């Protein structure tokens, strides 16, 4: 048997239940108009979506425009550079042509000088005479004797140099010094040089 408190509690909780059993009202004209408006809004949504796509595509178009601007700038730079190259190349051709003309004029100036031509002709004659005279002197007995003496002295000099070099190497190996004192009290310096001989095959 329930207590009065329990009965009161049950009675108080019952009014919240009938919410699921509320009568459903049929749509009237206003409701149908609102539904129509709502449908129209829904139809217009794709257009808004297209606008959003168009907005998203704007950076791509901006990137394309930037790339086109860079390409145009590069083309302008190349055109300017080609123009500079062509102008300088043509200027160089003009200068080279002028140099050739000036050199030709300078050469003609010397060639057409009568006094210079006479002097050159005399110089050629003198050179021929000088060469002939040297040939005559080469056959003179005194010249031949002197040439033989010079050859002998050159051979003696070579032998003395080789002997002295060997003695200096020995002296350096013993004293580890590159100078020596003479009998007159002077000090002479020398150097040791190494030379690679050709390999024997």
Image: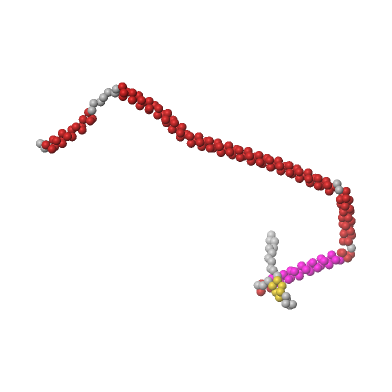
47 or 149, which is in the foreground?
Answer: 47
Q: On the rendered structure, is 189 left or right of 61?
A: right
Q: Is residue 43 above or below residue 190?
A: above
Q: How many marks?
A: 0
Q: Is residue 75 magenta?
A: no
The answer to whether one can see residue 128 in this image is no
Instruction: Measuring from the top left, give residue 49's x and y in whole percent.
Output: 42, 31
Q: Is residue 159 magenta?
A: yes
Instruction: Measuring from the top left, give residue 105's x and y in whole percent.
Output: 81, 45
Magenta residue span:
145-170
186 or 20, which is in the foreground?
Answer: 20
Instruction: Measuring from the top left, give residue 108's x and y in whole percent.
Output: 83, 46
Instruction: Measuring from the top left, give residue 144's x and y in whole percent.
Output: 87, 64
In the rendered view of the protein, which quadrant contains the N terminus?
A: top left
Instruction: Kindly identify the residue that appears in the image at 87 percent across and 61 percent down.
Output: 138
Locate residue 149: give its quadrant: bottom right
Q: What secondary structure is the magenta-colored segment mainly?
A: helix
Instruction: Kindly identify the residue that appears in the image at 58 percent across and 38 percent down.
Output: 73
Q: Is residue 10 above or below residue 165?
A: above
Q: Is residue 71 above or below residue 111?
A: above
């Amino acid at each position: 048997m329930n207590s009065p408190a329990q009965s009161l509690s049950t009675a108080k909780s019952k009014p919240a239940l009938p919410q699921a059993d509320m009568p459903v009202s049929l749509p009237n004209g206003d409701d149908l108009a609102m539904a129509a408006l709502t449908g129209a809004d829904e139809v217009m949504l794709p257009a808004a979506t297209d606008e959003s796509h168009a907005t998203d595509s704007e950076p791509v178009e901006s990137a394309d425009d930037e790339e086109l601007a860079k390409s145009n700038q590069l083309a302008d730079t190349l055109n300017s550079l080609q123009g500079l190259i062509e102008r300088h190349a043509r200027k160089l051709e003009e200068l080279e042509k002028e140099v050739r003309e000036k050199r030709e004029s300078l050469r003609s100036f010397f060639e057409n000088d009568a006094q210079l031509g006479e002097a050159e002709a005399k110089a050629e004659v003198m050179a021929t005479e000088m060469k002939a005279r040297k040939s005559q002197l080469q056959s003179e007995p005194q010249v031949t004797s002197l040439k033989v003496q010079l050859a002998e002295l050159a051979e003696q000099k070579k032998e003395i140099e080789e002997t002295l070099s060997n003695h200096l190497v020995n002296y350096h190996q013993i004293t580890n010094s590159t100078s020596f004192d003479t009998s007159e009290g002077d000090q002479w310096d020398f150097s040791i040089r190494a030379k690679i001989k050709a390999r024997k095959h």
